[in-house]
Image: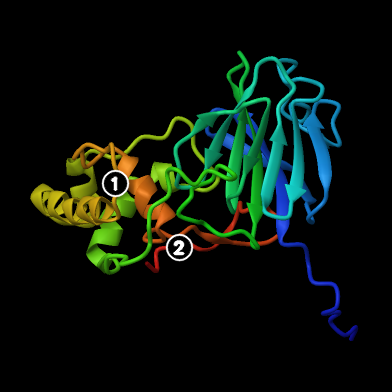
Amino acid sequence: MTPLDISHPPPTRWLAVHEGEGPDLRITATRPMPVGTRVTVGREGDVAIGVRTPNRGVSRIAVEVTASPTGWRIAVPNRNGAVMHPWGGPLQVASPVDGIDWPLLGIRLRHTNTSQHWILLSADDLAITPAGPVAGDESSGTDLAGRPSDLSKGTSQAIRVVFHELLSWPPRHPATPLQLKQAATRLGIAPPSVRDRLAVAWDKAAELGVNGIERDLTDPGYLYALVRAGYVRPPRVAPGLAGLRYISSGSHD
């Protein structure tokens, strides 16, 4: 039996292409992304996208990804652009060059075709931080000094059921919160109980000093604050699939 070589551990960062028609998306390419690696992704890129699921609306070079020591550097040279979907955070239209410091990031290419084309990035060596996914953005962070106590199991379950689509990995588009009646049915409790549990979570976000969020229990603004503060954890995922297959759901808050 060949001994395990622990001097060269498997890479902790991966890139995958996730694409297809309608709900039938599949992984069509994967690539390890050690720190310092730079790859182009497109119909004629180092990693192909828009080829196995044909789409000439995808640029020859759609995105350039570099694994930096602190996160990811994303360049989007194509004219149609792309949308960033950091796990547990608000989506944002990509700039020509972005720095994203986040462990799970989906990049959705914009085009006029009905198919979806995603680049999935996962990094075991990156952590969720109060500053959020934008590199160097300290203005919107939450202060963890005097951090309120953890969410109860019931509150965590309510958050994950109501915001299931927004917490999915790989990301979904579109992704919308469940109505409270639907969430109550799934949880096996009455709608007022769901509302009470979410109100506790909203109050936690308010205690963190988050400003500018209204008390709408299905608005994900307070969810994003809870994610940044570590109350809602990301899934642990199997290496080599850019986070496609879960090791655990992250429901152990």
Secondary structure at numbered mark 2:
loop
User: Is 107 located above or below residue 158 in the figure?
Assistant: above
**Of residues 82 and 95, the one drawn nearer to the viewer in this rendering:** 95
**Residue that label 1 marks:** 162
Image quarter in which the C terminus is found? bottom left
- Left of 132 or right of it: where is 54? right
**Residue that label 2 marks:** 250
- Which x, y percent locates residue 230? 41, 61
**Of residues 172 and 32, the one drawn nearer to the viewer in this rendering:** 32
Distance from Cα at disc 2 to Cα at disc 1:
15 Å
Q: In the image as oriented, which residue stretches furthest toward the right?
A: 2
- Which x, y percent locates residue 198? 21, 51
- Which x, y percent locates residue 250? 45, 63
Residue at image point 61% right, 21% down: 110
User: Is 252 located above or below residue 24 in the figure?
Assistant: below
| Precedes in sequence: disc 2 or disc 1 | 1
Residue at image point 26% right, 54% down: 158
* Amino acid, disc 2: Gly
